[in-house]
Image (spheres, rainbow, N blue to C red):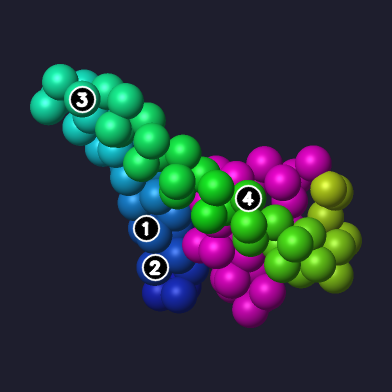
Amino acid sequence: MNKKLAFWLLVQASTILLYILLIGGGYAINQPLLGWCLYAALFMLHVFELKTALKIGREKGLSTLRVVVMNLLFGFTWWVPLKQGIIRK
């Protein structure tokens, strides 16, 4: 496996782990609202990236639905390597 691809896949997995830690950590410290608010803040960052992700996704011939889903899950850790050609369609 290409080292660049492995790096970006690790970063993407870390994004999912971060979601789990934010929400689970909130429950662990008996502050679930705090965990959900932190998760919502991270999710909103991904929402703000949609314009860039859609532009790149369209250039690569991807559907709008796929771009939206992948960006909301992974944010820049998905569209940066897509733009660089490290991640293919």
Judging by the rendered image, the residue that carries numbered circle 1 is 10
* Element on which disc 1 rests: helix
Name the residue nearer the viewer: 67 or 82.
Answer: 67
**Gap between marks 1 and 3 measured at Cα:** 29 Å
Judge the density around disc 1: few (<14), some (14-19), many (≥20) Cα neighbours within 10 Å.
few
As drawn, the label of residue 31 is: 3
The amino acid on which the numbered mark 3 sits, given as a three-letter code, is Gln
Secondary structure under badge 4? helix
The stretch of residues the image draws in magenta is 65-89
Locate residue 82, reporting x and y percent: 65, 68
Residue identified by numbered label 4: 47
- The nearer-to-camera label among 1 and 3 is 3
Q: Is residue 78 above or below residue 56?
A: above
Q: Given the image, on which type of amino acid does mark 4 rest? A: Val
**Alpha carbon distance from label 1 to label 2:** 5 Å
Pointers 1 and 2 in contact (CB under 8 A)? yes
Q: Position of residue 53 (x, y in %)?
A: 71, 62
Where 62 falls versus 29 (above or below)? below
